[in-house]
Amino acid sequence: MTMAPAIIDQYFDKALPIQNNTVLTVTEVPDCEEKLLKLLESAMLRGFDNHARLTEIHLPMERFPFMDSKFWHVPIEDCGKAQVLRFFFEHPDAEAH
């Protein structure tokens, strides 16, 4: 079972207003390519909306071998056997706080 898009959006809404660099971990990884791509797109757009650039993605490449080393301009790293998805967001003012 994967998280509903509305629940994911709630997590983004709570995590991204923070004025620091943020790592958001999703423990229920989508089960298909289409859902994964929608989630990655949503993360990137939420970052833009909150002035927190998505700088890196970690996902289980074994489950998603079709993924390249980048999603648009965002590097993708393999998280190995961990069945999690991590989004790394960088806030431009994080070092000032």
Image: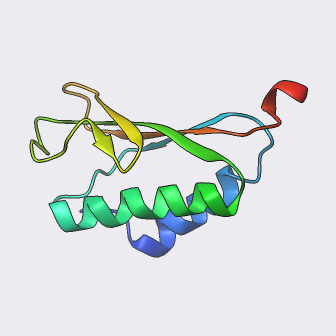
Q: In which quarter of the image is the N terminus?
A: bottom left
Which of these two is toward me, 83 or 41?
41
Q: Examine the rendered structure and indicate whether residue 17 appears above or below residue 62.
A: below
Which residue sits at x=67%, y=64%? 49
Which residue sits at x=28%, y=51%? 29
Q: In which quarter of the image is the C terminus?
A: top right
- Which residue ends up furthest to the bottom in the rendered image? 6
User: x and y percent of residue 72 in the render?
Assistant: 37, 51
Q: Examine the rendered structure and indicate whether residue 50 appears above or below residue 60.
A: below
Quarter of the image for residue 81 reads top left
User: x and y percent of residue 66 in the render?
Assistant: 10, 47
- Which residue ends up furthest to the front in the rendered image? 73
Q: In screen coordinates, is 57 left or right of 17?
A: left
> In this figure, what is the number of numbered marks?
0
- Asked whether residue 32 is in view, the answer is no
User: x and y percent of residue 11 in the render?
Assistant: 57, 58
Which residue sits at x=17%, y=58%? 31
Which residue sits at x=49%, y=75%? 6
Which of these two is toward me, 65 or 85?
65
Q: In screen coordinates, is 25 left or right of 49?
A: left
User: x and y percent of residue 54 in the render?
Assistant: 54, 44
- Asked whether residue 46 is in view, the answer is yes
Quarter of the image for residue 89 reads top right
Q: Which colour scheme is used?
A: rainbow
Q: In screen coordinates, is 88 left or right of 67?
A: right
